Each structure stands twice: as structure tokens, then as C-alpha cells.
Amino acid sequence: MASPKSKSKFGTHKSGTLYACRECGDTTTKWGGKCLSCGAWDSLTEIAATALEEATERRGLGDVSEARPLKDIIVSKEPRTRTGIGELDRVLGGGIVPGSLVLIGGDPGIGKSTLLLQMATTLSAGDVSVLYVTGEESLTQLKMRAERLETPSPEMSVLSETNLDAIFRQCQSSRPAVLVIDSIQTIYKPDLPGSPGSMTQLRECTLALMVHAKSTGTAIFIVGHVTKEGVLAGPRMLEHMVDTVVYFEGDRHNAYRILRAVKNRFGATHEIGVFEMAAQGLLQVDNPSQVFAHNRGERDPGSVVSCSIEGTRPILVEVQALVSRSNYSNPQRVSMGLDSKRLTILLALLERFAGIEVGMQDVFVSLAGGFRIEETAVDLAIATAVASNHLGKKCLADTLALGELGLNGELRAIPQAEARVKEAARLGFKTVVLPKPMQGKVNVPGIDVKFVKKLEDAFEFIYQV
């Protein structure tokens, strides 16, 4: 007699049976010789579907809720909790929101665990209950790292555990206001298939942490590993499940690290915090403009200063360019911190409208300090730096170049121009070159603003003759 069919949220299958892949943990209702998710052969094993359903009920997803009118929802005025680290508070949108789930990613050794340990010890010293869970270190190793950073806090609770159920039991007894999970790739649920770090474990553990955060008001920080491409390891939906996603940028061999918010439900996206890695941990950089554009005086050919808006903060950056004779049939186009395709367009504009012929030469462009920019307001500075190095002309001292270049060689308007000019004036710059459409919209005392219409017109105000 054939086995009876049953219907569940996982599909129709016989006798409540599912098949899970031993490699990636994904489930299917039909056995096969090859896993359709990861491509592994002979990796499907039979499991009971009721185990997954019971786990779903335990984490609270089976509860039935009722719709309510939006006007009846009462918003609490509970203030954010300051971390004691100003640059981190800026990235989070002003502090920690109770019940939020924050995912921090970055290359190995760039400072994720260091920053969270500094945050946890600072919070616990300020009478905020914190539970720091490490799945990669022993408690002795964690204590040694805290002492090395000179931030030991006797009040902070620490736990070396990878079983999520055991972590939740500890949370029920200690009821922390802030929970740190380092890292999510080491955490697992024993009633789910797959090893820690597999697709199913990552997805289900993150979902369980999200439900715990929303139901208890605990703010949870989780560390996520990244792949060699620089994206968070695991299913892309992890970034959609959490409230805030922040990445560490920069070379781990460089002293300066940038913490950037790429998603934030409680603040501005693309807000950045700047840190310097020292022997005692990550130190805040209160004035990033002096780091990325430290010299406002006379510059060598190929060096131009511009200004980028990162979130709500204007930051001066130094654009450096090098043009040299090519030894290859196809000249190189190398950019560090900039879009390489944008650089190709700007080189074509230089040749077409300014007579700067670099088509058969190697061109290298970078931003000083390991900074990274996506906006087009620095187009004029990039083009000017390339032309300056190619012609051997120095740029005028205390001069800032701002503007987006159109494909007809015209300078186009840029957003928040006045905030950029004010930052330049604060650091002692005397002259700013802006697009003609911005005339009448920028008025900053103590600084001379030159408005230009075309790319070639800007050179006479920037070059030192």
C-alpha cells in the first residue's frame, strides 16, 4: 500500500518526510542524487518535517496576530542608547535602538570584533547590561583581548557558546539590554539540518534572533563573515532581515578604517565613521577631512582636493593621478577608490574637450588614505588631477574643485554644495571652483567661489601658471 500524502507549509510529501543536504542544509520534498542548491552529489538525507515545524512554533512564528489601525499604534519615546563611541553612534543614526538587529561585516582582521568588544565594555561600564557571546574564542582568549585593549569591564557578561538554544536560555536568565553574537557563522540550532554556517542554519538562526529582538526589546549585534568578493557570506536575504547593515572598509594593513552604513531603518544610509587602528584598539577620528586631505598648501602635479558627502557629513578628499608612458599595446586604466568605468568616461572627455591626449598612456588614479567614493561630484577633481600630471602643472594652493561632468563637457550642478564649501572654509581653503548652475545658491563668507560652465574653463582657476 502506498504511503499517505500529507500537506504542510513545506509542500506535499509522503509521511511528513523531507530531505536535507548535508553540505548546504537546504531542504526538498523529493529525493535526488544531486542537490539542486549547491550541486553536491549523494548528499540528501531524510529528515522529519515535523522537526522544522516544531522549531518554527517554538520561535514564535506560529502565533496568530490581528491587524490594527495605524492610528491606534502608540510609538514609545524610548531614547536611543549611546554607545560611548561617537563615530559608531553616527553610523547607527544616533545610538542603539532597543529591539534592533545590526549586522556588521568586513574582511578578517579589519576590526569587527575589536569595535564590538570596545562598545560592549563601554556600555557595561555605563550600567547597561550586555551579554557578549563568542563562538570563535574561549573566555580566556576574550579576557586577554579585553586587557590588551585596556577596556576590561567586570560587569560585562561573557559566554562561549555556539548553540542558539543555550544562548536564548542565558538571555532569559540575565535579560541583557544588548546582545553581541560573534559570529553568526558559528551559531547553530540543533533541531535543524546542516552544519554551522550553512544556508539553512544562517537563515534560521538570524530569523530566530530577529524574533527575539522584536519580542524582548533586546538590541542584537551580529558579526558576519565576508566572501573573497567582499560581500556577506550566506544568503542575500540576511541583509533584508536585519534592521541595519554596516561594513568595514579599507585595507586591514592600513591604519585607517571606515565603517559605512549601507542599510539603516533608523538613520541615514551611507553614513560613515572613521577610525584609526592603534595598539589600544580602534580610535575615533574626529576630523576625517584632515586625514584624507591633510595638506591644503601647494601641491605636486597630479594632486587635487575635492569634497564628498557621506551620509550627512562633508569630507575633503585628495585625488591623486599619475600618467606615464605605456609599455603595453593596451594602456592600463587603474583606479583605487573610484569607479573604473567613470574614469574611462572622464578620460574621453579630457581628450575631446580639453585636448589632453592620454589614449596611449597608462593612467592611475587613487584617493589618498584608502577612501572610497561613488558620487560624481568629484568628476572635476579627477579630470583636473589627470590633466595636471600629464601637463606637469601644479594646482593652486588652497583651491578646491567640485562638479559633475556631462558628456558634452559641461559642468553640472551637485547636491549640498554649500555644506561642501563650508567644510572647505573651515579647513582654511581660499578658493572653490563650482559649476555655473550653482551661481546664486552658495554664499559662504571668507571664501572665493569661481563659477565655470565648461571643463576647459575650470583649468585657468585651478592650475598654477
Image (cartoon, grey):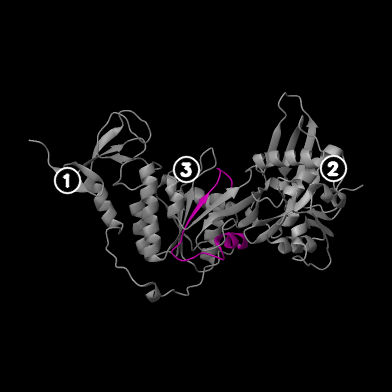
Can you say whether 269 is above or below 405 in the image? below
- Number of dots carrying numbers: 3
Of callouts 1 and 3, the N-terminal one: 1
Q: Nearer the viewer, mark 3 or mark 2?
A: 2
Proximity of marks 3 and 2: CB atoms separated by less than 8 Å: no
Q: What residue sits right under mark 1 in the picture?
A: 6
Frontmost residue, 176 versus 78: 78
Q: Position of residue 12 (x, y in %)?
A: 21, 43
Position of 126 with respect to 22 (left or right) is right
Q: Position of residue 363 (x, y in %)?
A: 75, 35
Q: Nearer the viewer, mark 1 or mark 3?
A: 1
Can you say whether 25 is above or below 422 in the image? above
Q: Residue furthest left?
A: 1
Question: Which portion, as a residue range, is magenta?
Answer: 86-110
Q: Quadrant of the N terminus?
A: top left
Please tell me whether mark 1 sits on a helix, a strand or a loop: strand
**Residue at the spot x=81%, y=38% of the render?**
356
Query: Distance from label 3 to label 2 (Cα)?
Result: 42 Å
Q: What residue sits right under mark 2 in the picture?
A: 301
Q: What residue sits right under mark 3 in the picture?
A: 233
Frontmost residue, 266 versus 146: 266
**Three-letter code, disc 2:** Pro
Q: Residue furthest front?
A: 408
**Three-letter code, disc 3:** Ala
Position of 296 with respect to 215 (left or right) is right
Query: Distance from label 1 to label 2 (Cα)?
Result: 75 Å
Please tell me whether mark 3 sits on a helix, a strand or a loop: loop
Q: Position of residue 460 (x, y in %)?
A: 87, 50
| Residue 207 can be seen, yes or no | yes
